[in-house]
Image: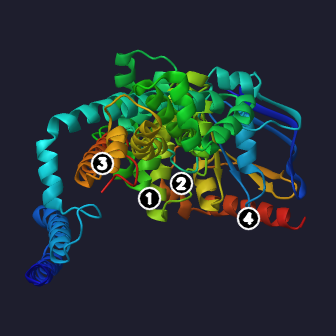
Amino acid sequence: MIWILFVLIFWGAMWAVNVRLAAGPQTQLTKILVPTLFGITLLVLWEGLVRGFSISPILLPPPSMIAQRFATSLPILWEDFVQTFIKGALSGYFIGCSAAFLTAIAVDRSDFLKRGLLPIGNFVAALPIIGMAPILVMWFGFDWQSKAAVVVIMVFFPMLVNTVAGLNAKDKFQDDLMKTYAASYWQNLLKLKLPAAMPFIFNGLKICTTLALIGAIVAEFFGSPIRGMGFRISTEVGRLSLDMVWAEITVAALAGSAFYGTMALIEKAVTFWHPSQRN
Amino acid sequence: MNQTVISAQNLSLTFQTNDGPVHALKDINLDIDKGDFVSFIGPSGCGKTTFLRVMADLETPTSGTVTVNGMSPAEARMKRAYGYVFQAAGLYPWRTIGGNIRLPLEIMGYSREEQAKRVANVLELVELEGFDKKFPWQLSGGMQQRASIARALAFDADILLMDEPFGALDEIVRDHLNEQLLKLWARTEKTIGFVTHSIPEAVFLSTKIVVMSPRPGRIADVIDSTLPRDRTLDIRETQEFADIAHRVREGLRAGHAYD
């Protein structure tokens, strides 16, 4: 009862503080402070309610328990992170996005390829990843290579479609202008089409960050060496140590956010000229 | 002096659209001499922009011939015989003003020193000194259009084709740019083809005014201006100016009688 009362009071207090901050002048500090306080409030609510209602840690462990588990399992979490994120997700992301980018340029150049390759890309995107993952594990083995292959399949199509759309994004005058200069295909591509396509390309790259992580984790459910985030999640669920599962989820959330944030930062630097990035 | 630069013979262009064929140009015959400032004026749909685009090899005529510097438009385009200024400035937002002007020079393979020299040169010509490091979206519409003119002047084309370059600007800016354009024309001795739908603008700028009428697009009248080449905005108050403007207006009205 004490816990629930405390949680309600804390919630009310934080709410009042945030309303005040949001109503006041907007500074760099309040911009960070408001969401931070909101996050802290959520965690305190979670902790208090789990304790107050005596919820079984199997159903939902409190954040403190997850944090404790996180702190004591750092070597395992790091090993899983390297296996799944660095080896599986990142290499698959890099291979898949590069392949899609090059395919998009080929598709853009030739109408024949556009009619041939886009439907194939479409078809691959429609393959159920849950069905493909075991097959790819058979083909490429238990280690990270098969996870990277799953990621390649997942990121290829969104990246392809975005890049193809981007290469068509230049406006009529800009295109005619290149024609009046008698620019070659490559000059046109490098000086007009690719820069104009950048906002679309980065859109694709950002969408693919989360897809890559999901793909790499899910693929491990279908066979993996005894490390990796997906492997850990599936085995620890079996052992009912849900705090470890939550610790892995925390790692995935942090890695995914950092990955997305990095791409967004690069995007800001490259497409500074686009109306969505100017301020 | 009277050397023909652009010549059109029995030129026709028909667009096939879903609503049936549209006769954008029909039996156009016109000669443009070196150093001329030729305006094309007419209501929308009279084919004036299409005609300019045919000269630039951006459209292909259905029948008849056009020569630019004695060549076909396609050959002239490959030889970079003309600079083209579009209705919208069409500057690349990821390049600075200097970078935009440098674009044709990079494509045409000018050396770095030559590029820098020419950029500085044309920026001065359009009175945009000191703006080369700015991005297009940091400039006003009039300044952007001046930058796009500078871009068309940066390389050695002796023909300048302009498609309603000042159409989107207010009258005060427009007057100023018109005066600047005349000065620029006198300094560079280029041949200019200029599409507009403003009668005062056409009369003020041109040595030759081509009045066009719509459906099908054809030439209603060709007026050789009697105004001196060296002129200022005051000339618009003279009787001679009013007489030429009157004749343009008559031509436009006659064109509409075909409807």
Q: Which residue is mark 2?
A: B166
Q: Which comes before the other along the chain, label 1 or label 2?
A: 2
Query: Which amino acid, mark 3?
Result: Arg
Question: N-terminal of the two: label 2 or label 4?
Answer: 2
Residue B13 on image: x %, y %: 85, 43
Query: x, y (%) of residue A86?
Result: 31, 30
Give yes or no for contact between labels 1 and 2 (Cβ–Cβ under 8 Å).
yes
User: Which residue appears farthest toward the front when viewing the image?
Assistant: A239
For disc 3, the chain is A
Q: Which mark is residue B249?
A: 4
Spatial CA distance of label 3 from label 1 is 77 Å
**Dot 1 corresponds to which residue?**
B173
Residue A239 tag number: 3
**Which residue type carries mark 1?**
Val
Query: The residue under label 2 is which amino acid type?
Result: Phe
Which of the labelled discs sits on residue A215, or is there none? none
Q: Amino acid at mark 4?
A: Arg
> Disc 2 or disc 4, which is closer to the eye?
2
Q: Given contact means CB atoms under 8 Å apart, are the residues at marks 3 and 2 in contact?
A: no
Residues marked 4 and 1, same chain: yes
Tell me which corner region of the image, top left, top right, bottom left or bottom right, holds residue B236.
bottom right
Say which of marks 3 and 2 sits in front: 3
